Amino acid sequence: MTAPATLDVIHDPARASALLHPLRLRILEALAEPDSAAGLARRLRLPRQMVNYHVRELARARFLERAGRRRKRNMVEQRYTATARAYVLSPELLGRLGPDARRVEDTFSAAYLLALATQVQSELGRASVEASALGKRLSTLSVSSELRFESAEQRAEFAAQLQRAILDVAGRYASPAELADGRPGPGRPYRLILGCYPIPPKREARGPHKERAS
């Protein structure tokens, strides 16, 4: 049994379809630690045949792997464990229906920022898969911070100053993305995207299998 991956980026529609089932999400969550279908059925208080079916489908779609056997009374049970700790559905699953920042005219809109975030998720997912296939670590940079602005004027001045600072740093330390003749500049290309948006109110996290209290 290998150690579970930190993240599984799902590009295949068949795998996405196999994953997006409420009970299967519960099974994957429960199988963060190895267990058998029978043991899982006891924990979830569900029919063993039902759980066994969904376990087999998840294993067929490579979301579960075998994790050894154990003896339970007069039976030997096959144990399984999740192959990843978390999952991301690639935006490429939507094909042309996915958001495209080039089609959004208002660059200050939430739609534009969401389209950029989708682009990051898509490109980073592909780059992660390629790096993993080569046995390499993907070099990235990320900054996350929470800010408060007391007025629109304060927010606008912050944005202007930040833009000037980024342009200054990029001009001093990065090579041009494109040469004067249109050819790509030297070095490996990187994408820098900076976004700022109001943080929505926090709400109680509820899994897809949890019912609202009556």
Image (cartoon, grey):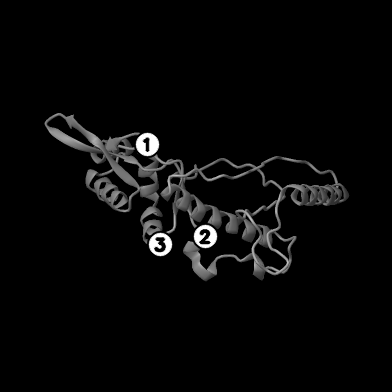
Residue occupied by mark 2: 91
Could you tell me the amino acid type at mark 1? Ala
Q: Position of residue 210 (x, y in %)?
A: 45, 44
What is the x, y in percent for residue 188? 60, 54
Q: State which mark lies toward you, 2 or 1.
A: 1
Give the residue number, with chain letter if any, for mark 3: 13
Q: Residue at x 27, y 46 (%)?
A: 51
* Secondary structure beneath label 3: helix
Q: Measure the C-alpha gap from mark 2 to mark 1.
A: 26 Å
- Closer to the camera in the image, 175 or 83: 175
| Badge 2: residue crowd in 10 Å (few <14, some 14–19, many ≥20) | many
Disc 2 is placed on an element classified as helix
The answer to which quarter of the image holds residue 105 is: bottom right
Q: Which mark is residue 3?
A: 1
In the rendered structure, the answer to whether residue 183 lies left or right of residue 170 reads left
Say which amino acid is labelled 3. Pro
Foreground mark, 3 or 1, reads 1
Is 154 positioned to the left or the right of 14 in the image?
right
Pointer 3 and pointer 2: residues touching (CB < 8 Å)? no
- Mark 3 residue crowding within 10 angstroms, few (<14) / some (14–19) / many (20+): some
How far from the left and from the top, in percent, is residue 41? 27, 40
Q: Which residue lies at the image location 13% right of the left edge and 34% below the top edge? A: 75
Q: Residue furthest left?
A: 74
In this image, 62 relative to 196: left or right?
left
Which residue is at a point 64% across and 54% down the rendered structure image?
Answer: 191
